[in-house]
Image (cartoon, rainbow, N blue to C red):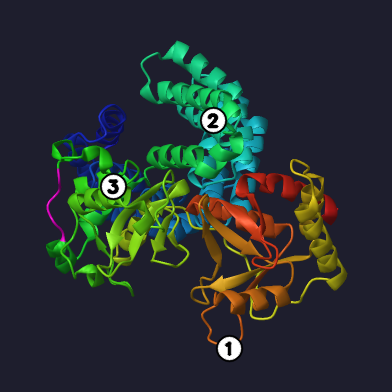
Amino acid sequence: MERDLDTAWELFAAQPTHPEIAVLAARVIAAQPERSSAALLLGNHRELCGDTDEARRLYLDVAGRRDGQFVNAARSLRHLASVDHDRGEALHWAQVVLREEQEDWRDWMELGAAQATAGQHEAGWQHLDDAVARCARTTPDELPRALGMRAVSLLETFAPADRFIAAAEEAIRADAANTSVALMLGWSYLLQYRFTDAEELGLRLLRDDPTDELLHNLVQTTRSLTKAIESGEADGYTLDDIRRSGVIEMSWQQIRDRTIGIDLASALAALEAAVPADLRASLRPAASVTDLADRERLGPVVAEDLVSWHDGQRPGSGHLWGLDEGFRLMTAAEMIAFDAAVEEDPAGHPDWPENELWEPVMTDDQGAYLVVVGHGALVKRRPGHPDEPVAASMADWIWDRVAGFGGRDPRPAPAQLDGAAEVERPADNDPETVAEIDRLSQAVRSAPEGDSTAEVALWQQVAGLRTWFFIARGPDDEPRPFALALDQGPVICLYSSAARAREAARLLDAAGVEGGPVPLLGVPMPEAVDYVASFGRSGVFGVALDHPHAGHYIPLANLGMVKGWADGSAR
């Protein structure tokens, strides 16, 4: 039996899916049913062969014995749940492992990743840092690997760009050959408009791998943006214009999502497996984009992916998505014809401005559309009405449908409030502090062009508030903050007082309570900054203050500065 088991492990190390592994392991189990190591080996083999149900059964059987292999069985169950995107189960087994053993830095890294994926962002990210520190103390020769794992986990859980950049830079200093982390670091430099750093990193990496298309794309994008700014200065084209277009943010999000497997193509593949039969019957066959006439009129952001999946949907079948409004997918011909109609008669289409990104992808056949706009956000557009946010991106809308149809959703969960927010009537902020915010808000309006002194003072005062207030939308057990759809992307509405939030909710008809009590989210500072920043994973562009009373806003990228001021106020 020992020889069979040793041979099976050796074969597993060389060819983990070799069928002889199952034969040898089964023979050992038949002779010695209590041999947990053989059951774990067979489970590992079945998992890699794609039979996850059998692997899970074997792991649970070993875990139920509570013998010397219990921790390894728990680790295997943790891994299986993580691969299966079962956030709660992955976190459960990560905690089980650490109740048994606390020495291995990898277990702390896995706990941090599981927590952050489940929405416990700050706790999870802190455990990632703790795992790196533990590795440095106990097994310093493995530190480059730990640093790389932390950077990848931060990326996969949508950590703020400045946090990922710091971790990625440390990982690259320890292991310059970690090109996957280095590539995302380069795009993160672009996200912070650090064009020189992005180009220098891209060129250095290309010296090691001159054939990497993504690295060439990084360098070319950086040079194109730099040239556009330099050549556009004479015509008044500025860095602010690029920020408003959202082109960098959209490119970074697409590459990040592709890297971690949550991009639109991945979402459509998952939807294909989960779509109900009646909805499937309403979908048209896929179109060949290369064969389309006037292909250049088809939107480049999401339209090509959509029609290559299914070329639209039968009119009148939008209700089959199971949503309140009956929007259906448009065909390529409909998208192309719409683009031509707007170009031919722009005055007759005032809601579709020239020189702005918009791709209509769904219609209710009654004049309303779901449209992909700047920063990749999906909005509802109706004639004569402001755009209404629908989803952070087309990919997010598709993943929501996958989850609604019973499929697995691989996206990390949004930040949990951990009981910090109240829905109903949280205590209000000090009136004198709110009055000072109003004074500074007026000073910002009166400031000379280019003078940001008053604006900095305003956001410093906002950072000093005890609580940030938001109008709560959605169900009570999963509230989300009310947001506006701007050209740059969705912007979360932050209020300096509960009273002001309630007033705005009624003015904007934002709470959906028809005269009843306005549900609010009150999030204490400085945790509120991290709460808002977590919506960057959903494509939110920024945060607006006291809309429509004031309406000043900043991009989420600037929240790191606000967090620093808030931390200073707390101290």
- Mark 1 sits on what residue? 516
Q: Nearer the viewer, residue 131 or 284?
A: 284
Residue 464 placement, left or right of 62: right
Q: Does residue 489 appear anywhere in the picture?
A: yes
Q: Which of the pair 156/313 is nearer the observer?
A: 313
Give the SS element for disc 2. Answer: helix
Q: What element carries label 1?
A: loop
Residue highlighted by disc 3: 303
* Amino acid type of the residue tagged 3 in the rendering: Ala
Mark 3 to mark 1: distance in Å? 41 Å
Q: Which of 348 and 463 is in front in this view?
A: 348
Marking on residue 185: 2
Query: Residue 381: x and y, percent?
Result: 39, 63
Residue at 77% over, 58% down: 462
Q: Give neighbour class at mark 3: few <14, some 14-19, many 20+ (Cα, 10 Å).
A: many
Please state the horizontal and vertical placement of residue 26, each as a whole percent of the image: 21, 45
**Few, some or many C-alpha atoms within 10 Å of disc 2 (few <14, some 14-19, many ≥20)?**
many
Q: Mark 1 and mark 2: span between their CA atoms?
A: 48 Å
The image quadrant of residue 439 is bottom right
Residue type for callout 1: Gly
The image shows a total of numbered marks equal to 3
The answer to whether the residue labelled 3 contacts the one labelled 2, judged by CB atoms less than 8 Å apart, is no
Residues 520 and 329: in front is 329
Q: What stretch is highlighted in magenta?
A: 283-287
- The structure residue drawn at horizontal position 32% and vertical position 72%, both measured from the top left corner, is 323
Which of marks 2 and 3 precedes in the sequence?
Answer: 2
Residue 555 vertical position relative to residue 364 in the rendered view, above or below? above
Q: In the picture shown, does residue 302 fall above or below 138?
A: below
Count neighbours of disc 1 (C-alpha within 10 A) and say few if under 14, some if 14 to 19, many if 20 or more: few
